[in-house]
C-alpha cells in the first residue's frame, strides 16, 4: 500500500472515495446473502466484509482488489458448520489464515498457477450449481427448518416439502433475478426513443438512478414492496431477529490441538480455495486496471492475516472477490484506499441502518445469490468442450461432477491427480525412438525425440529385445540431439540397453546430448562407462 501512496494526489483520492463508496454499497446485500446461505447470521458476512476488506486492502499485494466473503465459500462453510459446528468453523478459518500466511511467507504463491484451468472451471461451475440449489428453499418459500449438506439429500428434501410452496416468495425472488438482469441494460440501448426521453428532466433524473448498483435497487424496492403490502414471506427479522446495531464483540473460540488435528481437511480446503480465488481475482485485476502487477506472496500473507483475525469477531472465511473487484476498477479505483473506503462505507451503513435490515425478505437475497451463481459459472465452456481433447474434457467434467456430488477438496485433489496422470501420458506419447536407415548389418541406429522419463521407458524395451536377438558384435547408435530431458528411470533404461549390447560384445554410442541429459549421464558415471573409462575411484 505504501508504494501506491508515494505519488498519491487529491484527484486519485476522489476517485478512490467514489469507487470505495460504490463497491461498499454493492457489497452490502452480497455479504448478508453469503452468510445466510452459509448457515450463519447475516452480521457474520457484514463484519467479515468490513474487517477482512480493510485488512486485505491495507496489507495485500494488489492495488485494487476487494476482499470479503465470497460465493465460492458458501458450500464449504455450510458443510463445515453442519458437520463440525460454528465454533470449529472459526478455528478452521483461523488455522487456514496461518496456512495462507505461511504459503506467502515461503513464497509459494506462484504454485497456485499450476492448477489447470480445466480444474478451475470444473469446480467453479460445480460451486455455482450448489449455490443455486441452496437458494431454492428461500426462493420457493419452502417450510424447511434446515437444509442438509448433501446434494441428493437437498433435492429429496426440496421435493418432500414442495407442498409448502409460497407464491409470494417465489414472485419476489423472480422479480429480483429479472431486475438484476434488466437494470444494468435499462439505458444501454441507443435508440431514438431513449434520446427523446433524455430531453425530459424527470426522465434524465431517472437515467441517473440507473447508475445505482442493481443489487441495492432490488433490495430496497422489493423490501419496501414486501413491507407495504405485508406479504407473508420470511425476512431477516423473522428468522434471525435482525442485525445487531453495534461493533461485534471480540471472542476467543475454544482452542485445543486435538480439535485442530480433526479440522485438517476443512482448514486445507478453506486455505486452498482462498488462495486460488484471491490469486485468480488478482490476475483479473491486473488485466483490467493500469495499476502495477500484483505480488502473489504478499497477497497470500494479507489473506492469511484477514482470515486469522475475522474469526475472533464471529466472521467467516474471506478471499478476493472478482465481482466487487471489477466494480471497484470500473468505478475508477486506483489504489488500496478504495478498498479501505469500501470497508468504512459498510461499517457506517451497518452502524446507522442495521434495524432496517430486518424487513429484507430472504427470497430477495436468494434472488441475488441465484444471479451471482449464474454469473459465477462459465457455462459456455460446456459448449466448447467439443473443441478440446478428451484429457481436457475428463478433467473438467470429473471435477465438476465430484464438486457437486462429494465436495470441493475431493474434486480439486481428483483434478490435480488426473492432470498429473494425463500429463505423464501425453509426454510419454511424445517420446519416440525412431529407427534410422541401416547402413551396415551389424549397426542399429535410432533417433531419440522428446523426454525419456519414467512414463516413456517402455519404448526402449523393443530396442533391448532386438539387441538380444542380434548377432555378436552388434553396434547401437542413439542420436540424442532431439532428446530434451532425461530422468533417472530413463537413465536406467539406457543402462539396461548398454548391458544388453555389452553382453553381445558390441558397443553403445550416445551422441548429440543436450545439456540436461548430458549432465545426468556424466554425473552418474554412465558416460565414462560408455567410453570404457575406469571408475573414478578405481585406485582406492
Image (cartoon, grey):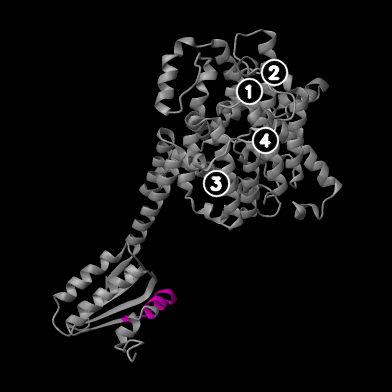
> Does residue 385 lie above or below 510 as drawn?
above
- Please name whichever residue, 333 or 49, is drawn nearer the observer in this view of the structure: 49
Q: Nearer the viewer, residue 440 or 190?
A: 440
Marks 3 and 1: in contact by CB < 8 Å? Answer: no
CA gap, disc 4 to disc 1?
24 Å
Q: Earlier in the sequence, mark 1 or mark 3?
A: 1
Whole-angstrom CA distance, mark 1 to mark 3, is 31 Å
**x, y percent for residue 204:** 79, 25
Label 1 residue SS: helix
Foreground mark, 1 or 3, reads 3
- Secondary structure of the residue carrying tag 4 is helix
Instruction: Write the start and end of the magenta stretch as one range.
Output: 510-522
- 2 or 4: mark nearer the eye: 4
Using a 10 Å C-alpha cutoff, classify the residue at mark 2 as few (fewer than 14 neighbours), some (14 to 19) or many (20 or more): few
Q: Earlier in the sequence, mark 2 or mark 1?
A: 1
Mark 2 vs mark 1: give the one in front: 2
Q: Which residue is mark 3?
A: 276
Mark 4, residue position:
49
In contact (CB < 8 Å): disc 2 and disc 1: yes
- N-terminal of the two: label 3 or label 2? 2
The residue that disc 2 covers is 221
Q: Nearer the viewer, mark 4 or mark 3?
A: 4
> Residue 276, percent across and down?
55, 46
Q: Earlier in the sequence, mark 4 or mark 3?
A: 4
Left or right, residue 74 beside residue 530: right
Residue that mark 1 sits on: 179
Amino acid at each position: 500500500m505504501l508504494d501506491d501512496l508515494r505519488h498519491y494526489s487529491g484527484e486519485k483520492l476522489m476517485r478512490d472515495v467514489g469507487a470505495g463508496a460504490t463497491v461498499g454499497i454493492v457489497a452490502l446485500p452480497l455479504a448478508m446473502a453469503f452468510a445466510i446461505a452459509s448457515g450463519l447470521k447475516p452480521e457474520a458476512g457484514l463484519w467479515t466484509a468490513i474487517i477482512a476488506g480493510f485488512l486485505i486492502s491495507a496489507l495485500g499485494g494488489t492495488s485494487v482488489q476487494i476482499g470479503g466473503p465470497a460465493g465460492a465459500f458458501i458450500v464449504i462453510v455450510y458443510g463445515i458448520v453442519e458437520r463440525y459446528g460454528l465454533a470449529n468453523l472459526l478455528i478452521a478459518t483461523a488455522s487456514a489464515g496461518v496456512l495462507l500466511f505461511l504459503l506467502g511467507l515461503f513464497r509459494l504463491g506462484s504454485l497456485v498457477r499450476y492448477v489447470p484451468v480445466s480444474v478451475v472451471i470444473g469446480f467453479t461451475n460445480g460451486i455455482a450449481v450448489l449455490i443455486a440449489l441452496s437458494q431454492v428453499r428461500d426462493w420457493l418459500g419452502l417450510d424447511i427448518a434446515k437444509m442438509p449438506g448433501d446434494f441428493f439429500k437437498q433435492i429429496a428434501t426440496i421435493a418432500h416439502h414442495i407442498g409448502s410452496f409460497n407464491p409470494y416468495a417465489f414472485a419476489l425472488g423472480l422479480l429480483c433475478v429479472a431486475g438484476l438482469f434488466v437494470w444494468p441494460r435499462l439505458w444501454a440501448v441507443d435508440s431514438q426513443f431513449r434520446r427523446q426521453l433524455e430531453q425530459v428532466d424527470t426522465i434524465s433524473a431517472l437515467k441517473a438512478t440507473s447508475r445505482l448498483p442493481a443489487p441495492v435497487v432490488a433490495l430496497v424496492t422489493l423490501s419496501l414492496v414486501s413491507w407495504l403490502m405485508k406479504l407473508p414471506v420470511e425476512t431477516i427479522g423473522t428468522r434471525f431477529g435482525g442485525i445487531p446495531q453495534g461493533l461485534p464483540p471480540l471472542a476467543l473460540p475454544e482452542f485445543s490441538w486435538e480439535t485442530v488435528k480433526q479440522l485438517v481437511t476443512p482448514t486445507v480446503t478453506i486455505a486452498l480455495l482462498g488462495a486460488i480465488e484471491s490469486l485468480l481475482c488478482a490476475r483479473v485485476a491486473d488485466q483490467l486496471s493500469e495499476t502495477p502487477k500484483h505480488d502473489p506472496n504478499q497477497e497470500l500473507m494479507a489473506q492469511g492475516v484477514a482470515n486469522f483475525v475475522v474469526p475472533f469477531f464471529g466472521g467467516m472465511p474471506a478471499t478476493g472477490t472478482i465481482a466487487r473487484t471489477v466494480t471497484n476498477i470500473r468505478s475508477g479505483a486506483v489504489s488500496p484506499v478504495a478498498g479501505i473506503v469500501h470497508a468504512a462505507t459498510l461499517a457506517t451503513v451497518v452502524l446507522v441502518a442495521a434495524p432496517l435490515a430486518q424487513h429484507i425478505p430472504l427470497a430477495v437475497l436468494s434472488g441475488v445469490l441465484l444471479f451471482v451463481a449464474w454469473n459465477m459459472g462459465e457455462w459456455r465452456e460446456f459448449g466448447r468442450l467439443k473443441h478440446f481433447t478428451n484429457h481436457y474434457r475428463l478433467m473438467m467434467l470429473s471435477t465438476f461432477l465430484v464438486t457437486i456430488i462429494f465436495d470441493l477438496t475431493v474434486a480439486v485433489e481428483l483434478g490435480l491427480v488426473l492432470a498429473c496422470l494425463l500429463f505423464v501420458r501425453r509426454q510419454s506419447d511424445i517420446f519416440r525412438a525412431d529407427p534410422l536407415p541401416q547402413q551396415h548389418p551389424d549397426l542399429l541406429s535410432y533417433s531419440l525425440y522428446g523426454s525419456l522419463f519414467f512414463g516413456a521407458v517402455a519404448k526402449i524395451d523393443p530396442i533391448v529385445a532386438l539387441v538380444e536377438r542380434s548377432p555378436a558384435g552388434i553396434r547401437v547408435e542413439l542420436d540424442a540431439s532431439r532428446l530434451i530431458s532425461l530422468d533417472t528411470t530413463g537413465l536406467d533404461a539406457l543402462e539396461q540397453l548398454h548391458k544388453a549390447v555389452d553382453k553381445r560384445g558390441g558397443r553403445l554410442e550416445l551422441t548429440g546430448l543436450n545439456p540436461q541429459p548430458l549432465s545426468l549421464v556424466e554425473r552418474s558415471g554412465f558416460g565414462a562407462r560408455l567410453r570404457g573409462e575406469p571408475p573414478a575411484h578405481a585406485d582406492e
